[in-house]
């Protein structure tokens, strides 16, 4: 599969987050492909968005969000979990799409070894679960998602029609005031779609 062109990412983050559904997230480990189809994302849109990491401006932690779209923004949270985001938009504008879940398609033995005792449907069913399954950590921060030779890449996959996509407010952002808390910027492949049957 061809990796996504950078022009895919240099668009408004809501479009990027929605169109990432069905694309293939690949982690390259020792020459082995591990990953799957993206089935859930959330959009975070600039310093004005009070749920976004950039709401207080640029810091050492969020600096990669200010890069040109198509980079990985990987951060540590709750003292235990890594989260993977795709930077969106032009350089200087901090926006990113959080990858919340994938449907595994590549590297099943590797993923199973990373998720012992977990049923397959839950291997990658949350943002911390998928980073655990794919061994994504801080070493992946800043990775070029448009390079097939890099640690992380995003490839073309299965296009998702609008009737296979649901939207809802983002989760875990109770601290954010309105209207940010209720923005329908969570995108998910509907459970009844062909992809998840």
Image (cartoon, rainbow, N blue to C red):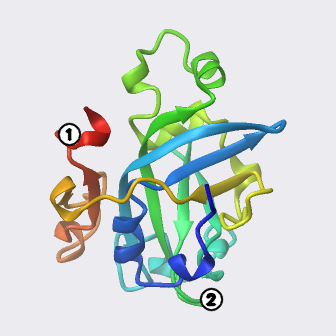
- In percent of width and height, residue 125 lies at 39, 35
Q: Is mark 1 on a helix, strand or loop?
A: loop
| Residue at 66% from the left image edge and 73% from the top image edge | 64
Q: Quadrant of the C terminus?
A: top left
Residue 47's tag is none
| Residue 79 showing in the rendered view | no
Q: Quadrant of the N terminus?
A: bottom right
User: Nearest the camera: 25 or 129?
Assistant: 25
Residue 91's tag is 2
Q: How would you rate the neighbour count of disc 2 (Cα within 10 Å): few for under 14, some for 14-19, many for 20 or more?
A: some
Q: In this view, does 80 lie to the left or right of 12?
A: right
Q: How would you rate the neighbour count of disc 1 (Cα within 10 Å): few for under 14, some for 14-19, many for 20 or more?
A: few
Q: Which comes before the other along the chain, label 2 or label 1? A: 2
| Residue at 61% from the left image edge and 78% from the top image edge | 6
- In percent of width and height, residue 55 lies at 44, 78
| Residue at 61% from the left image edge and 70% from the top image edge | 62
Front label number (2 vs 1):
1
Q: In this view, does 134 lie above or below 143?
A: above
- In percent of width and height, residue 80 lies at 57, 36
- In percent of width and height, residue 5 lies at 61, 75
Q: Quadrant of residue 82 in the image?
A: top right
Q: Name the residue under label 1.
A: 191
Q: Is mark 2 on a helix, strand or loop?
A: loop
């Amino acid at each position: 599969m061809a990796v996504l062109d950078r022009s895919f990412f240099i668009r408004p983050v809501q479009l990027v987050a929605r169109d990432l559904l069905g694309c293939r997230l690949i982690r390259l480990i020792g020459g082995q492909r591990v990953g799957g189809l993206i089935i859930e994302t959330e959009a975070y849109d600039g310093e004005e968005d009070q749920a976004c990491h950039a709401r207080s401006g640029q810091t050492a932690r969020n600096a990669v969000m200010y890069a040109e779209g198509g980079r990985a923004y990987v951060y540590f949270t709750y003292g235990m979990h890594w989260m993977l985001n795709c930077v969106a938009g032009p350089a200087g504008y901090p926006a990113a799409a959080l990858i919340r879940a994938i449907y595994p398609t590549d590297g099943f033995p590797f993923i199973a070894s990373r998720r012992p005792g977990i049923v397959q449907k839950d291997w990658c069913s949350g943002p911390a679960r998928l980073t655990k399954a794919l061994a994504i950590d801080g070493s992946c921060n800043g990775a070029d998602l448009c390079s097939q030779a890099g640690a992380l890449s995003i490839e073309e996959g299965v296009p998702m029609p609008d009737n296979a996509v649901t939207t809802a407010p983002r989760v875990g952002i109770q601290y954010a005031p309105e209207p940010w808390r209720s923005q329908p910027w969570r995108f998910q492949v509907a459970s009844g779609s062909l992809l998840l049957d």
